[in-house]
Image (tube, rainbow, N blue to C red):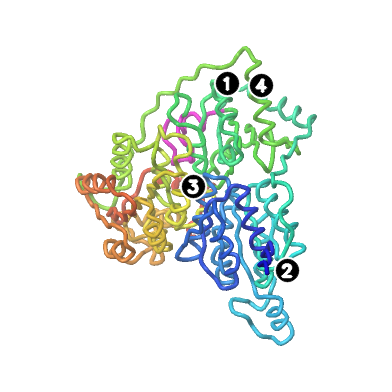
C-alpha cells in the first residue's frame, strides 16, 4: 500500500513564503508552541535557524540582518518571548526595517479551556489577544492565525505590508494550526509601489527648485531611508549632477560612499565636526531627503525649519508648505532631472576653512599621555583600520553612547559600513545586532559598546561564539552611564562633581566573562596595550573577541560636551530645577 503524501501545512506555507522573499536566516529561541514551525524550518533547504540566548537578542539580530538584506525574522515563544522582543521590534518600526516576529499561542482546545474554565496556560496573560494587540502599535500588520483556510491570505497580506512599508509585522499561529493542511502558495509576493499625485509632485518640485535656485549655499542632508528604500544610486546621481555638498544623519551614516570630495561629514548637531557645522548651520536651503529627524537636531529645526525642504516616507514639505501624496523616490527622480536640465549645475563646492575642534577629551584631573580616552581610542582604532585596509571588510556598529558621537566624526567610510540605532536608541542594540550584521553583510562586525549597554545584552557573546562569528566587541569601560549623566548634569564631570547614583555601574571582570562565554578576552588601558590587542584581534578566525577599553570614569568627549551644552530650550533632557 502506497504511503499517503503528507499534507502541505500552515507551518510550511509560512516558511516557504519567507524564503521566497529572500530570508536565509531565522533568529530563534525555541518554545513549545512554535515547535512545529521550527521543525518545518529546519527541514527546509535554503534557510537556516540561528539560535540566540534570549528573545531580546533574536530581535536585535533580526534588526541587524534586515539592515543589509532587506528582511529579517525572529521566532520567539508566546508571551514571555514576544514581550521581550517588543523593544527590538519597536526599534525596527521606528527605523524602517522589515522584520517578521513569529510566535505561537495555545491551541484551540487550550484557548477554550482558558476562556471557559479559567485555566491559565503557560506564558498567557489571560488575554489571548494581548500579544497581537500590543504588537499592533509597532507593526504594519499584526495577525493571529486560527483557521488554516485563512492562513494563506493572512500570511501573504502581512508579508506584503512588511515589504511595502519597510516595517515589522507580527504573525501568531495557534499551536494546533501549524500542522493543519492549507493551500499552497499562489503567485509571488511583491511590495505595493506607492505613486505620487502628478500635479502635487510637480508643485512640490517647483517650490523646492525655487528655494534651491534662490539659495546661496544649499546642502543635501541624506537620511537612512535612502538606503532602506533602495535609492542610493539615485541619491549619488543627485550629488554628481548638482555638485552640492552632502551630509547624513547619524542613523544614515554611510548611505553613500564617504570617500568623495562632496561629503562634508556626518551631521549630528553640535557633536558634528567643525566643517560640517559650518556648512549645515549656515545653509539657507537644507534639503533633508529620506531623513528621520530626532531630537539630536533640535538646533537646526529651531533655526532652519522654515527654510528647509524635507521629504521622507511620511511627509513632503517646502518651508511651511506641505504636499500630500508625494513619494520620496518620485521626488528624488524629478529633482535629478531638474539638476541635469539646468545649465548652472553641477556647481563647484569649496569647503570653508574653519579652525578644527579640540578633540582632546577632558576629565576631572590630568589624563596621562598614554592613557586611553574616547577620542584617543577612536583615533587609534580607525587609524589602524585604515592602515590595515579593513574598512571594506568590516562594519562599524556603534551603540547609543558617547562613542556614537565620537565615531560619527569619522570620514572616508565606504557605503553600508556603519550601523547605529540612532533614532530608537536602545542600549545593548549594538552587541545584540552584531550576529545579524555579520550574517546579513558577510562582513566582520567591529562593535563599540558602552559598558551599560553591553551589560544589558552580554549573553549574545555566546550566540556569536556558537555561530563562529569573529566579531570584535570593544566595551568602553568607565563604570557609568556617561551619556545619560551628561544630559542630567554636566557638572558631574568636574573635579568636585559626582555621578548620580543611578548612573553608576558595577565593575565587571570582562576577561572572565569572555572565557565563560567561549570568546577571547582582552584588556587595554594604554595606547601600547591597545596596539597589541588590535594586532591580536586581527588574526582571530571563527571566534569573537571581547575587549575591555579602560577609560577614566569622568572622561568627557568634546563631541558629547558640545551636544549637552546646547541652550536649555533645545536640550535633549532638562536637569531638575
- Which residue, given by chain and number where applicable, does mark 4 sit on? 337
Quadrant into which the N terminus falls: bottom right
Is 295 contained in the magenta span?
no
- Say few, some or many: other residues with alpha carbon within 10 Å of mark 3 (under 14 / 14 to 19 / 20 or more): many
Give the x, y percent position of residue 321: 73, 35
- Which residue, given by chain and number where applicable, does mark 2 sit on? 146
Is 278 contained in the magenta span?
yes
What stretch of residues is rendered in magenta?
264-283
Which one is in front in this view, the residue at disc 4 or the one at disc 3?
A: 3
Q: Which mark is residue 440?
A: 3
Give the x, y percent position of residue 53: 45, 65
* One can see residue 136 in this view: yes
Q: Residue at x 38, y 52 (%)?
A: 469
* One can see residue 367 in this view: no
Q: Name which of mark 2 and mark 4 comes first in the sequence.
A: 2
- Which residue, given by chain and number where applicable, does mark 1 sit on? 242
Amino acid at each position: 500500500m502506497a504511503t499517503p503524501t503528507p499534507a502541505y501545512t500552515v507551518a510550511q506555507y509560512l516558511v516557504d513564503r519567507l524564503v521566497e522573499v529572500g530570508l536565509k536566516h531565522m533568529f530563534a529561541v525555541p518554545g513549545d508552541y512554535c515547535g512545529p514551525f521550527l521543525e518545518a524550518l529546519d527541514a527546509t533547504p535554503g534557510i537556516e535557524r540561528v539560535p540566540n540566548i534570549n528573545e531580546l537578542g533574536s530581535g536585535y539580530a533580526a534588526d541587524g540582518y534586515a539592515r543589509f538584506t532587506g528582511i529579517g525574522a525572529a521566532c520567539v515563544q508566546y508571551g514571555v518571548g514576544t514581550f521581550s522582543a517588543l523593544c527590538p521590534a519597536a526599534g525596527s518600526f521606528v527605523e524602517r526595517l522589515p522584520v517578521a516576529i513569529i510566535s505561537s499561542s495555545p491551541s484551540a482546545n487550550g484557548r477554550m479551556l482558558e476562556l471557559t474554565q479559567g485555566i491559565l496556560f503557560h506564558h498567557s496573560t489571560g488575554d489571548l489577544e494581548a500579544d497581537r494587540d500590543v504588537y499592533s502599535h509597532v507593526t504594519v500588520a499584526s495577525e493571529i492565525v486560527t483557521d488554516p483556510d485563512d492562513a494563506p491570505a493572512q500570511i501573504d497580506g502581512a508579508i506584503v505590508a512588511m515589504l511595502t512599508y519597510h516595517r515589522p509585522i507580527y504573525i501568531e499561529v495557534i499551536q494546533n494550526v501549524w500542522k493543519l493542511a492549507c493551500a499552497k502558495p499562489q503567485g509571488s509576493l511583491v511590495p505595493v509601489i506607492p505613486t505620487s499625485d502628478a500635479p502635487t509632485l510637480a508643485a512640490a518640485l517647483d517650490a523646492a527648485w525655487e528655494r534651491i535656485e534662490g539659495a546661496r549655499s544649499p546642502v543635501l542632508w541624506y537620511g537612512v531611508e535612502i538606503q532602506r528604500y533602495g535609492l542610493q544610486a539615485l541619491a549619488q546621481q543627485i550629488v554628481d549632477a548638482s555638485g552640492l555638498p552632502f551630509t547624513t544623519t547619524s542613523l544614515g551614516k554611510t548611505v553613500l560612499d564617504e570617500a568623495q570630495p562632496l561629503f562634508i561629514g556626518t551631521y549630528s548637531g553640535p557633536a558634528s565636526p567643525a566643517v560640517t557645522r559650518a556648512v549645515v548651520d549656515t545653509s539657507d536651503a537644507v534639503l533633508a531627503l529620506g531623513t528621520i529627524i530626532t531630537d539630536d537636531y533640535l538646533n537646526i529645526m529651531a533655526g532652519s525649519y522654515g527654510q528647509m525642504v524635507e521629504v521622507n516616507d511620511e511627509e513632503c514639505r517646502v518651508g511651511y508648505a506641505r504636499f500630500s501624496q508625494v513619494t520620496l523616490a518620485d521626488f528624488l527622480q524629478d529633482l535629478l532631472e531638474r539638476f541635469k536640465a539646468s545649465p548652472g549645475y553641477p556647481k563647484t563646492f569649496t569647503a570653508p576653512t574653519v579652525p578644527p575642534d579640540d578633540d582632546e577629551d577632558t576629565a576631572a584631573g590630568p589624563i596621562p599621555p598614554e592613557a586611553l580616552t574616547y577620542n584617543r581610542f577612536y583615533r587609534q582604532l580607525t587609524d589602524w583600520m585604515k592602515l590595515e585596509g579593513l574598512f571594506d571588510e568590516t562594519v562599524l556598529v556603534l551603540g547609543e553612547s558617547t562613542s556614537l558621537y565620537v565615531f560619527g566624526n569619522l570620514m572616508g567610510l565606504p557605503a553600508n559600513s556603519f550601523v547605529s540605532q540612532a533614532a530608537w536608541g536602545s542600549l545593548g542594540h549594538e552587541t545584540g545586532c552584531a550576529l545579524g550584521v555579520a550574517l546579513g553583510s558577510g562582513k566582520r562586525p567591529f562593535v563599540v559598546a558602552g559598558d551599560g549597554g553591553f551589560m544589558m545584552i552580554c549573553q549574545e557573546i555566546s550566540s556569536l561564539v556558537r555561530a563562529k562569528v569573529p566579531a570584535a566587541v570593544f566595551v568602553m569601560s568607565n563604570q557609568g552611564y556617561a551619556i545619560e549623566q551628561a544630559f542630567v548634569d554636566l557638572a558631574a564631570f568636574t573635579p568636585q562633581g559626582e555621578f548620580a547614583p543611578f548612573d553608576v555601574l558595577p565593575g565587571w571582570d570582562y576577561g572572565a566573562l569572555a572565557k565563560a562565554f567561549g570568546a577571547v578576552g582582552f584588556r587595554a588601558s594604554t595606547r601600547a596595550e591597545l596596539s597589541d590587542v588590535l594586532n591580536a584581534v586581527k588574526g582571530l578566525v571563527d571566534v569573537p573577541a571581547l575587549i575591555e577599553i579602560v577609560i577614566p570614569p569622568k572622561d568627557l568627549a568634546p563631541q558629547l560636551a558640545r551636544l549637552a551644552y546646547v541652550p536649555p530650550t533645545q536640550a535633549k533632557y532638562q536637569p531638575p530645577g
